[in-house]
Amino acid sequence: MTEVLRIRDLTVEIASSDSAVNQIGALSATFVGGRLHSVIGPSGIGKTSLCLALIGWQRPNLRITGGDTSFLGRSLTEMAPRDRQALWGRDILYIPQSSATTLVSSRGVVDQLAAFPGDTSSQRIERRLLLRSAFDRLDIPGFDENRYPHQYSGGQLQRILVSSLFCASPRLVILDEPTSSLQPALKSTVMTAIKARIQEIGAAAIVVTHELAFFEALSDGAIDLARHLKRPLPTKASTSRQKDRNSIRALAPENRPTPLDSNTGKSQPRHAVPLRIDRLSVHAPSGRPLVADASFSLGAGSCIGLVGPSGAGKTTVLRALLGQHRDSSGEILVGGRRLPLHYSARTTAEKRVFEYVPQSVRLHLNPALTIAYLIGRRLRQAGGGENSNEAAKVLDSVFLPTGYLRKRVSELSGGECQRLGIALALASRPRILLLDEVTASLDSANGALVVELLCKVRDHRSVSMLFVSHQPDMVARLADEVVEMRAGRVLSSVISVDATSPPTTFPNWASAFEPAHSVRRGRT
């Protein structure tokens, strides 16, 4: 097979989120056409930064200090920047984890993916035909409608990015967490399609992932960056990780206190209903139904796991609760009082009922701002003090050191950014947290830490939660009940979760995480 990319004794220095410099050295590998390799390692070690550096796209936190990388026999390290950039997009394709860094919100996704600079009219037509086939292959709706990015769910957008591989013929493709937003059954379908495509065109593929167990069956090899780490993290980082582990043990079910009311300190009953959704319906501007007659109740200090296939309407429900959909109907009752469906019609107090934490907090924050500024602004908006003591308490509640107040968003790892997102939400003192795939892009250790943190918030502050997720183990750990959605509708059955039972024993548990096309007609 043809050698596509060769790494020889590469040594890089990556500035980590705690101001240490991780040195990854003596990294050598060969990537050949038709083969798929995984790059693995803990969150924040620099997997994405390293892969981008391999093709000559260096982030500010990374410096190549030795070695060489060659692409089709040409040294990328010594190549002129203009010559390197000429390779990007055609010979070297990078598919990011988030569509926010690639797709423009004001244009249809089909127009964006089918447009390559320098294409002739016949090439554009051919590319659209290939893209249509890719949409069908990856089960992505809306090709003929040329929908905008905001009209797709997170899982659909991730598959849309992957579809760009099927209308191009690169020699090297780098995929950054291509399945993080997908339900388990769909991950295999997408990765099987990716592997078939790279074998078809003879491309070498590098997949950045934290799902090692899943990729073992598909990968032809793996690079574990943790094994190439020559300079360990400083002692304070190890101390921080030990604090995280201690916090997790302290939050085990047998050690949890009874939920307390934040004002009185008295036990608060779980059966109280702070939120009821009654026959909520949402339509797209075109009139297409997105959610139809959704109804369920959320108890005080409890969590509902909102599950279902990609595109089922889960995120749409969260956006409707935030008042972001104009064409919506039904009732949203908070504490028995009706909440206006549109954000502009809500009072200041009503606007503070919900706080939303997205899948990728980093994309919603200015990377140049400090943590102290962000938390201080939230505290001011909530009517509280903004002194350093209050901000430090907020950080401590999400297992982040006080010293992080001086850091900027750009200095945090993925797991730390997700905890910061929760901290910002808590600083606003909401009654209900809306959590949209908050653990999808994290490795298992950081994902477990975020879920345990949410357990602490739920039990100590009696904050209610709606938790959208495709990860059965995370849902089983956090949720008290599970509401399943399919094709914009809430199924009549609600799964009650017993944290002492394994997920496989829950009625209908497995089917709640299957793709939409596996559902039998007439199921209730």
Image: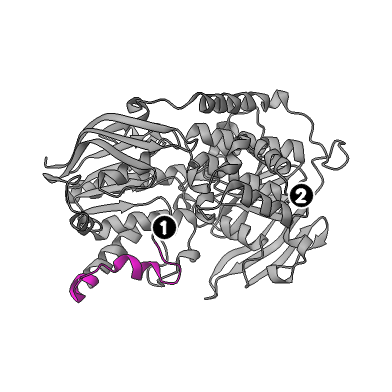
- Answer with the quarter of the image where residue 26 lies: top left
Relative placement, left or right, of 2 versus 161 is: left
Foreground of the two, 316 or 97 = 97
Tell me the amino acid under the disc marked 1: Thr
Numbered disc 1: secondary structure: helix
Span colored in magenta = 103-124
What's the mark number on residue 101? 1
Is 473 on the left or on the right of 297, as rendered? left
Few, some or many C-alpha atoms within 10 Å of disc 2 (few <14, some 14-19, many ≥20)? some
**Color scheme of the displayed model:** one colour
Q: Is residue 518 above or below residue 224?
A: below
Q: Which residue is mark 2?
A: 385
One can see residue 507 in this view:
no
Q: Is residue 54 depicted above or below 155 in this figure?
A: above
Q: Nearer the viewer, residue 35 or 137?
A: 35
Q: Residue at the location (76% across, 46% down)?
A: 299
Q: Position of residue 243 (x, y in %)?
A: 60, 26
Q: Amino acid at mark 2?
A: Gly
